[in-house]
């Protein structure tokens, strides 16, 4: 954006002119004292929205007029200073220790009499090409075809399962061998049940759009409390890593909550080498990694909880045979891990079966007959 003559500037709102004159600080337009032209402070590199792999260096350089006097340039990444320069030469930002997602780069240029500011966004994607896994069914167990599965965990021979849909949401303990539930409770019809997880002698359960989580006694399933959401958009999946509660909200963001206060403390954004991975749903922590169903697909993403990088994809296409499907059978959802027995279980919404599976490397299409 350029403004030609000085009389054009006179037409600007007096408040903007006053701010420029008093502070010399702008975010888009630099109020120059020399000459009648107005300059726009901009970046020579990177480009707006440019993507980088995690660990890749980011070269940052401003497009500064040759006659512009510079005393100091401070560069900030998401509000934290990452370097300074006393000229317009490039600065290199290291990304190997950063989290994934959008990052705001800010440059503050001080020429001794005023300060001009420019901002730009970049995107950090995973630098890892996910390994691909298929599966082998080891065992099959019965599953309630009325259960719109939202949460699934294995504990001492039983499954903790929560289900959704308004008017049909439940929380229950299920016998693995028989598929029978006891005890079992039903949620009020105004709540859509979502993910659940066991923490000590308590169970916590999410609701979808109601912005509230429920706390239950693990043995009796008697409700003993509630907690509000903070910044997370909705309630989807839930797990516990032994120290923190892990929560998804239907986006590519995974939240970490305090296990005692249920408050959101931090988060990771999930990306693979192509971009962000959205609609993360039911969660399970398996050997320190986060397993997440990707809603409306037959895939599970295996996620690094530190960086948010997708390390692997598990393709469960065809796991429920056509003969075992019914008109109400819905999508894959539900992951449970038997840490002691090293058994991995999966199911789906209103599936007639629950499966114990073993992961096997996927055969590349080029090697298939």
Image (cartoon, rainbow, N blue to C red):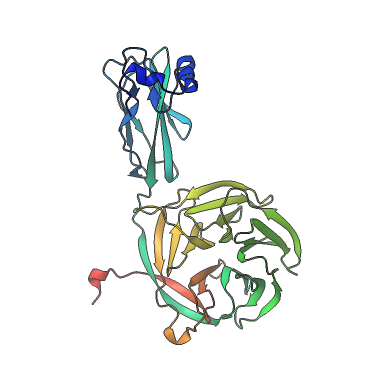
Is there any visible trace of residue 23 in the rendered image?
A: yes
Q: Residue at x 41, y 66 (%)?
A: 314
Q: Is residue 143 above or below residue 74?
A: below
In depth, the one of 328 and 143 nearer the eye is 328
Image quarter in which the N terminus is found = top left
Q: Residue at x 42, y 72 (%)?
A: 316
Q: Is residue 168 above or below residue 202?
A: below
Q: At which x and y percent is residue 230? A: 62, 48
Q: Residue at x 40, y 57 (%)?
A: 311
Q: At which x and y percent is residue 360? A: 38, 70
Is there any visible trace of residue 200 in the rendered image?
A: no
Q: Is residue 164 above or below residue 267?
A: below
In depth, the one of 183 and 234 nearer the eye is 234
Q: Quadrant of residue 57?
A: top left
Q: Residue at x 31, y 36 (%)?
A: 46
Drawn side of residue 33 relative to residue 225, left or right = left
Image quarter in which the C terminus is found = bottom left
Across the whole image, how many numbered discs are drawn on residues?
0
Q: At which x and y percent is residue 195? A: 59, 64
Q: At which x and y percent is residue 238? A: 58, 60
In depth, the one of 305 and 167 nearer the eye is 167
Drawn side of residue 110 relative to residue 334, left or right = left
């Amino acid at each position: 954006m350029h403004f030609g003559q000085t009389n054009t500037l006179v037409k600007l709102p007096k408040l903007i002119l006053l701010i420029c004159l008093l502070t010399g600080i702008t975010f888009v337009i630099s109020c120059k004292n020399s000459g009648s032209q107005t300059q726009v402070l901009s970046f020579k590199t990177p480009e707006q929205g440019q993507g980088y792999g995690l660990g890749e260096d980011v070269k940052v350089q401003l497009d500064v007029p040759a006659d512009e006097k510079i005393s100091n340039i401070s560069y900030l990444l998401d509000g934290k200073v990452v370097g300074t320069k006393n000229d317009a030469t490039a600065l290199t930002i290291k990304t190997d220790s950063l989290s994934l997602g959008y990052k705001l780069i800010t440059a503050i240029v001080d020429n001794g009499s005023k300060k001009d500011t420019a901002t730009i966004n970049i995107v950090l994607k995973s630098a890892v090409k996910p390994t691909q896994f298929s599966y082998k069914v080891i065992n099959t167990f019965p599953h309630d075809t009325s259960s719109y599965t939202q949460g699934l965990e294995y504990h001492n021979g039983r499954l903790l399962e929560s289900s959704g849909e308004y008017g049909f949401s439940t929380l229950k303990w299920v016998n693995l061998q028989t598929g029978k539930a006891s005890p079992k409770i039903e949620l009020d019809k105004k709540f859509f049940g979502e993910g659940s997880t066991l923490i000590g002698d308590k169970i916590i359960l999410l609701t979808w759009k109601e912005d509230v989580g429920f706390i239950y006694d693990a043995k009796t399933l008697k409700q003993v409390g509630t907690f509000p959401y903070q910044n997370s958009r909705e309630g989807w999946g839930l797990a516990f890593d032994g120290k923190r509660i892990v929560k998804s909200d239907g986006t590519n963001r995974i939240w970490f909550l305090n296990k005692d206060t249920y408050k959101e403390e931090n988060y990771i954004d999930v990306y693979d080498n192509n971009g962000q991975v959205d609609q993360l749903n039911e969660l399970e922590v398996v050997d320190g990694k986060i397993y997440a169903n990707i809603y409306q697909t037959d895939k599970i993403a295996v996620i690094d909880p530190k960086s948010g990088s997708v390390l692997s994809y598990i393709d469960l296409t065809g796991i429920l045979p056509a003969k075992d499907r019914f008109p109400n059978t819905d999508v894959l959802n539900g992951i449970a891990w038997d840490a002691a027995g090293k058994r991995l279980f999966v199911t789906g919404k209103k599936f007639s079966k629950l499966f114990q599976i073993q992961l096997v490397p996927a055969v590349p299409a080029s090697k298939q007959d």
